Amino acid sequence: MSKYKYSYPKFEENVACAVGRDIGISFKQAIEITRNIRKKDLEKAQAYLQRVIDMKEAVKFTRFTNGLGHKPGMASGRYPKTACKHILMILNQAEANAQAKGLGRCKIIHISAQQADKPMHSGRRPRLAMKRAHVEVVLQEIEKKQDKKHKSKPAEPKQPTPIETKGEKK
């Protein structure tokens, strides 16, 4: 198998990646799921996908909405369980790669879905194409914020001095 070329342009030392090729999921569902978890913390994205698998929260569909019904709290959405399971598995692989590199808490900086080849079914369903997609994930370690205790405190405003009147002495 040849080396996979990511669509993410630059790789640094604090980056981990994973890719799923020729996954048996709908390309349209993969696009909507990846759009919903892009730029999120890894733990939040994994929790979101688990809630979708448990049918507690729906994936908001914005692009492919032909005939979709409304879900509670949003306009149109679905519960794509199988696609979420596969994408969650790829996120877990990327997390394992990050731990192997010694990275701490990570954030998804790049996730994309591309359409894969569509092989034809064989047997009794010869003229139907299979649904396939590629999903790639790039994680980056979140930099730890500096403690606020070590920063210098702003100077306190000076107290106004009492005004002395002419003729009075203290």
Image (cartoon, rainbow, N blue to C red):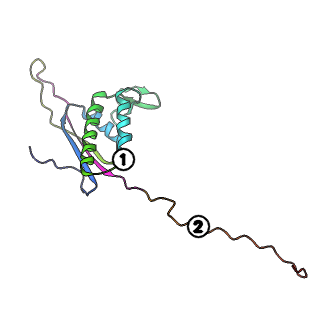
Q: Which percent across, then down, holds residue 169?
A: 88, 81
Q: Quadrant of the N terminus?
A: top left
Q: Is mark 2 on a helix, strand or loop?
A: loop
Q: Which percent across, then down, holds residue 161?
A: 77, 73
Q: Which disc is residue 23 wearing?
A: none
Label 2: which residue? Answer: 154
Q: Quadrant of residue 162?
A: bottom right
Q: Is residue 43 left or right of residue 22?
A: right
Dot 1 alpha-carbon crowd within 10 angstroms: few under 14, some 14 to 19, many 20 or more: some
Label 1: which residue? Answer: 39
Q: Is residue 49 above or below residue 101?
A: above
Q: In this view, does 140 lie above or below 127?
A: below
Q: Is any atom of residue 38 visible in this view?
A: yes
Image point (69%, 71%), residue name:
158
Query: What is the number of callouts on the image?
Result: 2
Q: Is mark 1 on a helix, strand or loop?
A: loop
Q: Is residue 107 left or right of residue 124?
A: right
The first of marks 1 and 2 along the sequence is: 1
Q: Is residue 143 magenta?
A: yes
Magenta span = 126-144
Image point (17%, 50%), residue name:
5
Going by the numbered disc 2, the residue's amino acid type is: Pro
Going by the numbered disc 1, the residue's amino acid type is: Lys
Residue pushed farthest right? 167
Q: Which of 100 and 37 is in front in this view?
A: 100
Q: In this view, does 55 lie to the left or right of 168?
A: left
Q: Nearer the viewer, residue 85 or 79?
A: 85
Q: Which percent across, then down, holds residue 112?
A: 27, 44
